[in-house]
Image: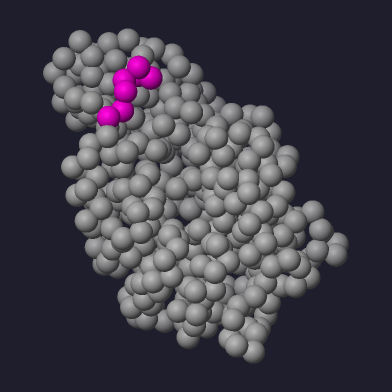
């Protein structure tokens, strides 16, 4: 069984990766947690909708759920505030502060509460003149805002790019990273720079040096079409994106929407599997107070998370995109001796029955001549030993995925 294959740390590889990433020591594996935006957006109506509005009450409740319901133990240890938390104006000294009605105790108290649960608190700023929701931007206050959030005990900054000139981002995001480092507080830096600059039209070597993770593409929406649109874009641009990912610096295809309204069970499995293949940060955006057992089982799957959190940190690639609407993606996984692989068979068909797909491991560019043992990550089913030429057949549900683990065996 692949669980018996003990993952070994490769110190030299980590040192080499560190040399190309920013010097804060964070995000050595893809960060995990919960983020408000996709599920709760900019709901500031705490009079008529107090249960769902952007408020300290919402984030304290989500922190409770992360800490008490097993999410933190599974690795989901960040809780992140998105847009619309601020007052509409800065104070007389130019400092940001939280909306006093919805965050009456301030962000520092909320950070203390989150930390008391063994969690980390993230917050949202915008590089431009205003946030996307119209709240104060940071372009003239980068150092001041870095010092403010550090003083509050913030652990992660998501910096958006609304109302900004894209040409300014090449200096602005690096400046913000430097100001945060000068505070002495380690703050994981999530950048939206490439999402505004055309995705692949940025200097990815600069991103690696200044950002721990970065959004490349459009906001995810609560739909299967949105999920597959992101997957397509990552596959089409993988030769640029994959080399930029690694310990300390990750491509971010946006939030997990598993547990929200639109995805079926199979589609939910597919998003979770593909985000693991892509070495993506795993930030859920759902309501943990009412999430279904089915969605929870997908998000909590230890073996999928194990793939996601692999210390080698290699982003997977699309190997096959067939006319039969089946895609095959592989990700190399660290092993003590020879590489192991995660293999995702993604079914883009919706014709009402599972599709049987046959391939050999040689077709997927696996190279260990003695072959591999194959196991289904979601079900635990053991396929047995396959050499490079033995045909492997998987049955993939419509809009679904089969995620396999292949490790060298005799």
- Taking the spot 35% from the left edge, 17% from the top edge, the residue there is 4
Look at the picture and state if 240 lies above or below 272.
below
Residue 260: x %, y % from top left: 65, 44
Which residue occupies the foreground of this view, 26 or 102?
26
383 sits left or right of 33 in the view: left
Quadrant where the N terminus sits is top left
The one nearer the camera, 252 or 386, is 252
Rendered residue at 62%/73% (across/down):
133
Residue 310 shows in the view:
yes
Q: Where is residue 5 in the image (x, y as percent from the top left)?
A: 31, 20
Q: Quadrant of residue 384?
A: top left
Q: What stretch is highlighted in magenta?
A: 2-8
How was the colour assigned to the protein in this rendering? one colour
Relative placement, left or right, of 138 versus 261 is left
Q: Give coordinates of residue 147: x percent, y percent.
A: 49, 74
- Residue 4 within the magenta-colored segment of the rendering: yes
Residue lying farthest bottom? 92
Residue 287 in view, yes or no: no
Q: In which quarter of the image is the C terminus?
A: top left
Task: Kindly give the residue lying farthest to the left in the view shown.
Answer: 369
Q: Is residue 296 left or right of residue 43?
A: left
Magenta residue check for 186? no
Q: In which quarter of the image is residue 335?
A: top left
């Amino acid at each position: 069984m692949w669980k018996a294959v003990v993952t070994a740390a490769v110190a030299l590889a980590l040192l080499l990766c560190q040399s190309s990433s920013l010097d804060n020591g964070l995000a050595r594996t893809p960060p995990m947690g919960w983020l408000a935006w996709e599920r709760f957006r900019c709901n500031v109506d705490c009079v008529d909708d107090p249960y769902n509005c952007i408020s300290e009450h919402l984030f304290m409740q989500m922190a409770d759920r992360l800490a008490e319901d097993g999410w933190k133990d599974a690795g989901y240890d960040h809780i992140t505030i998105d847009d619309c938390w601020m007052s509409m104006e800065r104070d007389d000294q130019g400092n940001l502060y939280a909306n006093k009605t919805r965050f009456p105790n301030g962000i520092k108290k909320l950070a203390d509460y989150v930390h008391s649960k063994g969690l980390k608190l993230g917050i949202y700023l915008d590089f431009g003149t205003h946030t996307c929701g119209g709240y104060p931007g940071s372009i003239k206050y980068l150092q001041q805002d870095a010092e403010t959030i550090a003083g509050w005990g913030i652990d992660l900054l998501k910096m958006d790019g609304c109302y900004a000139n894209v040409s300014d981002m090449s200096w602005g995001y690096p400046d913000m990273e430097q100001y945060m480092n000068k505070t002495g507080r380690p703050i994981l830096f999530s950048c939206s720079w490439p999402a505004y600059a055309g995705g692949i039209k940025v200097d990815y070597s600069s991103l690696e040096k200044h950002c721990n993770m970065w959004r490349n593409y459009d906001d995810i929406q609560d739909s299967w079409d949105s999920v597959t649109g992101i997957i397509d874009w990552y596959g089409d641009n993988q030769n640029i994106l994959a080399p930029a990912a690694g310990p300390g610096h990750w491509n971010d295809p946006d939030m997990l929407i598993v547990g929200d309204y639109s995805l079926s069970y199979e589609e939910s499995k597919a998003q979770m599997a593909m985000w693991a293949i892509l070495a993506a940060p795993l930030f859920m955006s759902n309501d943990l107070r009412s999430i279904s057992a089915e969605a929870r089982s997908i998000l909590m799957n230890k073996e999928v998370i194990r793939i996601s959190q692999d210390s080698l940190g290699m982003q997977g690639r699309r190997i096959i995109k067939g006319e039969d609407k089946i895609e095959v993606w592989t990700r190399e996984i660290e092993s003590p001796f020879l590489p192991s692989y995660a293999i995702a068979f993604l079914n883009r068909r919706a014709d009402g029955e599972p599709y049987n797909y046959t391939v050999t491991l040689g077709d997927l560019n696996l190279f260990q001549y003695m072959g591999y043992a194959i196991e289904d990550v979601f079900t635990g089913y053991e396929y047995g030993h396959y050499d490079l030429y033995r045909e492997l057949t998987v049955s993939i549900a419509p809009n679904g995925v089969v995620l396999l683990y292949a490790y060298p065996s005799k």
